């Protein structure tokens, strides 16, 4: 199978190597290129090359935007097992970033996590294992129950500018804070628009898997892409 690879970050390059190891012929994307499938990076967005592909082309995408009814669009990212693996990689990257940006150890640090989704659930226990005092803000009672069962404190209400924490991680992709919390390292992990109405003083850390662990991130996506290619081959 010949796969045309649209350019992306180091994660995309690693995916190309993994697919080549599977026996696929991997080539760079170019307008008019003939291939059995086209692999677009994460996030794909409204990639201009999607409009250039011939009708019926197999396009492997992640978080694609826009309407493309002329294509066989297959999402390799929106699968629970992929999202969970990606959350774990994001959590490790977030911890590495926090250690780089602060002069404190995580041991004894007071950490606030905004949100109770996959990334928060991966991040909380890892921080706890390193000795941090972790508080999780989540509106869902089930998410707060998870936080408490993982040894974290929980909040169901949040002031506009929370105080008293050394590190704040936001995982909610909607503005819930007016500005960065004073005296804290504020790290934005959520997709745009993020959790801060005013992002001044916030460390924007979107796309951590592709930056901090591109090979592990590619491996998490690789199995999903393999499954799609097998399904297409048998259909």
Image: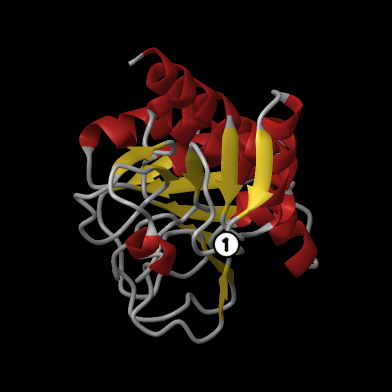
Locate residue 34, reporting x and y percent: 52, 48
Answer above or below: position of 152 versus 63: above
Q: Residues within 10 Å of mark 1 (few under 14, many from 20)?
A: few
Locate residue 93, reporting x and y percent: 67, 50
Residue 102 visible in the picture: no
Q: Of 61 and 133, which appears nearest the observer? A: 61
Q: How is the image coloured?
A: secondary structure
Answer above or below: position of 179 versus 211: below
Left or right of residue 199: residue 56: left
Q: Residue at x 55, y 31 (%)?
A: 85
Locate residue 7, reporting x and y percent: 61, 60
Name the image quarter holding the N terminus.
top right
Taking the view exactly as shown, the residue that stands out farthest to the top is: 234
Q: Residue at x 37, y 51 (%)?
A: 63
**Quarter of the view holding residue 124:** top right
Count every numbered label the image shows and give the total: 1
Q: Of 6 and 9, which appears nearest the observer? A: 6
Locate residue 155, reporting x and y percent: 33, 49
Q: Residue at x 54, y 24 (%)?
A: 226
Mark 1: which secondary structure? loop
* Residue at the spot of label 1: 30
Answer above or below: position of 182 versus 10: below
Name the image quarter holding the C terminus.
top left
Q: Of 22 and 189, which appears nearest the observer? A: 22
Q: Residue at x 24, y 54 (%)?
A: 68
Left or right of residue 119: residue 75: left
**Quarter of the view holding residue 65:** bottom left
Answer above or below: position of 8 versus 234: below
Residue 153 visible in the picture: yes
């Amino acid at each position: 199978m010949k796969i045309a690879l649209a350019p992306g970050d180091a994660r995309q390059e690693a995916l190309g190597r993994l697919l080549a190891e599977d026996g696929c012929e991997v080539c760079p994307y170019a307008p008019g290129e003939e291939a059995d499938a086209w692999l677009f990076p994460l996030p794909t967005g409204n990639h201009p090359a999607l409009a250039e592909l011939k009708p019926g082309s197999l396009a492997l995408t992640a978080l694609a935007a826009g309407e493309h009814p002329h294509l066989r669009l297959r999402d390799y990212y929106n699968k629970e097992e992929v999202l969970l693996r990606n959350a774990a990689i994001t959590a490790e990257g977030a911890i590495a970033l926090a250690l780089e940006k602060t002069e404190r150890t995580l041991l004894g640090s007071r950490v606030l996590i905004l949100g109770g989704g996959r990334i928060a659930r991966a991040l909380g226990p890892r921080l706890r294992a390193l000795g941090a005092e972790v508080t999780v803000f989540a509106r869902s009672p089930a998410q707060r129950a998870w936080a408490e069962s993982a040894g974290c404190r929980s909040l169901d209400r949040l002031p506009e500018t929370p105080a008293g924490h050394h590190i704040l991680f936001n995982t909610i992709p909607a503005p819930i804070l007016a500005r960065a919390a004073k005296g804290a390292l504020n790290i934005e992990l959520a997709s745009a628009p993020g959790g801060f109405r005013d992002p001044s003083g916030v460390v924007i850390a979107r796309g951590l898997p592709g930056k901090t662990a591109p090979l592990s991130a590619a491996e998490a996506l690789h199995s999903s892409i393999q499954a799609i290619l097998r399904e297409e081959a048998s259909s």
